[in-house]
Image (spheres, helix red, strand yellow):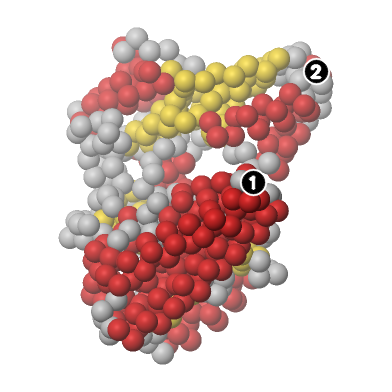
């Protein structure tokens, strides 16, 4: 049972989710995120102190220590009713808050914020929230043990900021860390997002890391189900901010869910699907504010396909990079070298399109644009690539549905719908599985295209 930031955002919401945990009678493991907004606070303060004049560092670190401690102290006092448990939890929160203060002092005095240091700073959000949730459950009569991801057996590589789990190690470590507790009737409450490398140095697993933690633990414990408790009813057929008539998707396949998560649906992160899919474990998305709702069940295959197209997603924070030059056709492995360089710098490529050996286009996140342009200009422009163009103010539209495979003319009907709205398609990509079609249009046209496709293929399927 994984609970996200909004589900543990206050004493009230923590009280609600601990009630849900108590009601679940089967053996279970709980995974929690940092309280809502805390991770952003930690990123902000780490960057701030690294740029401050030395004379101001201590004052700023002290101010943040008091803010951080006060926020978590208030939540703990509001939800932990057992005074003995509360006293113990508050003492530990104060110790961790002070450790955070000292860490920030080091960052500030050195004026250097490495990814390794940032991971250590960010870890405090989950390391404190897990104490509050475990204490709240203990005050309701449950035997609990608060653990970091590493203490629960998650071992990663040393790619700080976006660490990857080492499966070969975890086949032993997860079971040996958690099964003895479960066998004794002790509930493990695990900090999501936070793990450590083989040298026990703290790492974080990037955006969606808490979902990933839950899925990894589920895989290596061979659980019956992974539950992701969030603040929405499940996976919807579109973004409700864009489409008024969205529908809850009650059941969806792993591959469909992965594509939707990758291309804009924010309910889950795409990388959390892989561990569950490897072990064929169902993933259930539930709303902690509406636990009676049916939610969405993610499974390997659906017995019945109710409609050809299941959902349409939009991702707006992207840019297109166009690479041009006859030298590309004459330079062996230039695409491989280019993509390897971007990968080494943690720049993810969302879509690729190449119309010829002398023209290559790909899509990246807005956040990575400056770095990507600098790397390409420095290493390739004038050396195999004649010109680099950036197209901004664009968005990716992705249509997902296993029913599209083998349905004749579906792509033509989708593109005709786009054309009927007098919108031009800039770039197209479709995987060989035929489960999704993605294309790019101008950002100003995105919402209108999503609404039209949803209306034709989901509201009034034809």
**Rendering quarter of residue 360:** top right
Q: How many marks?
A: 2
Q: Nearer the viewer, residue 110 or 348?
A: 110
Residue 69, x across and y down, in percent: 43, 65
Q: Which of the two discs, 2 and 1, sits closer to the camera?
A: 1
Decide if residue 325 is on the left or right side of residue 16. Answer: right
Q: Is residue 421 above or below residue 253?
A: above
Q: Looking at the image, tell me whether mark 2 or mark 1 is earlier in sequence order.
A: 1
Give the residue at the far bottom of this rendering.
184
**Rendering quarter of residue 244:** top left
* Residue at point 65%, 33% (across, down): 371
Q: Which residue is mark 1?
A: 53
> Split into 4 quadrants, where in the image is the C terminus?
top left
Q: Is residue 256 above or below residue 371?
A: below
Does residue 338 appear in the picture of this structure? yes
Determine crowd level at label 1: few under 14, some 14-19, many 20+ residues with C-alpha closer than 10 A.
Answer: few
Give the residue at the far front of this rendering.
55
* Residue at point 49%, 17% (across, down): 426
Q: Nearer the viewer, residue 340 or 414?
A: 340
Determine crowd level at label 2: few under 14, some 14-19, many 20+ residues with C-alpha closer than 10 A.
Answer: few
Residue 363, x across and y down, in percent: 56, 28
Residue 325, x across and y down, in percent: 73, 14
* Residue at point 46%, 76% (across, down): 92
The local secondary structure at tag 1 comes to: loop
Decide if residue 275 is on the left or right side of residue 458. Answer: right
Decide if residue 166 is on the left or right side of residue 126. Answer: right
> Split into 4 quadrants, where in the image is the N terminus?
bottom left
Give the residue at the far left of this rendering.
292
* Residue at point 32%, 55% (across, down): 6
Q: Which residue is mark 2?
A: 382
């Amino acid at each position: 049972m994984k609970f996200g930031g909004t589900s543990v955002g206050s004493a009230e919401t923590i009280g609600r989710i601990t009630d849900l945990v108590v009601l679940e009678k089967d053996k279970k493991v709980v995974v929690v995120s940092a309280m809502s907004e805390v991770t952003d606070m930690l990123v902000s303060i780490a960057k701030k102190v690294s740029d401050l004049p030395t004379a101001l560092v201590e004052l700023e670190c002290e101010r943040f220590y008091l803010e951080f401690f006060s926020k978590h102290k208030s939540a703990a006092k509001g939800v932990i009713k057992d005074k003995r448990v509360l006293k113990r939890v508050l003492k530990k929160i104060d110790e961790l808050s002070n450790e955070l203060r000292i860490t920030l002092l080091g960052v500030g005095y050195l004026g250097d914020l490495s990814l390794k240091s940032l991971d250590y700073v960010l870890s405090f959000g989950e390391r404190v929230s897990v104490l509050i949730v475990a204490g709240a459950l203990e005050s309701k009569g449950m035997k609990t043990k608060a653990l970091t991801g590493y203490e629960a057996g998650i071992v990663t590589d040393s790619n700080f900021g976006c660490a990857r789990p080492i499966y070969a190690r975890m086949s032993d470590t997860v079971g040996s860390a958690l099964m003895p507790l479960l066998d004794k009737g002790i509930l493990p409450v695990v900090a999501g997002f936070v793990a450590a490398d083989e040298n026990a140095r703290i790492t974080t697993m990037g955006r969606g890391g808490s979902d990933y933690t839950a899925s990894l633990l589920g895989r290596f414990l061979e659980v019956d189900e992974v539950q992701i408790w969030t603040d929405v009813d499940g996976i919807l057929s579109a973004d409700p901010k864009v489409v008024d008539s969205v529908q809850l998707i009650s059941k969806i396949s792993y591959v469909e869910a992965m594509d939707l998560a990758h291309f804009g649906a924010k309910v889950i992160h795409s990388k959390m699907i892989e561990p569950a899919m490897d072990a064929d474990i169902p993933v259930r998305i539930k709303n902690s504010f509406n636990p009676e709702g049916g939610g969405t069940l993610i499974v390997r295959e659906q017995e019945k396909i109710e409609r050809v197209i299941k959902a349409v997603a939009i991702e707006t924070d992207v840019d297109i990079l166009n690479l041009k030059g006859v030298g590309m056709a004459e330079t062996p492995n230039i695409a491989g070298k280019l993509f390897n360089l971007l990968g080494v710098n943690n720049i993810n490529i969302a879509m690729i399109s190449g119309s010829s050996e002398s023209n290559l286009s790909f899509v990246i996140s807005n956040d990575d644009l400056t770095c990507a342009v600098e790397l390409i200009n420095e290493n390739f422009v004038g050396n195999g690539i004649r010109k680099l163009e950036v197209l901004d103010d664009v968005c990716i539209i992705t249509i997902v549905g296993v029913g599209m495979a083998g349905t004749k003319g579906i792509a033509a009907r989708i593109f005709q719908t786009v054309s009927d709205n007098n919108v031009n398609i800039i770039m197209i990509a479709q995987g060989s599985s035929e489960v999704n079609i993605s294309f790019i249009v101008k950002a100003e046209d995105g919402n209108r295209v999503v609404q039209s496709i949803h209306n034709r293929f989901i509201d009034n399927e034809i």
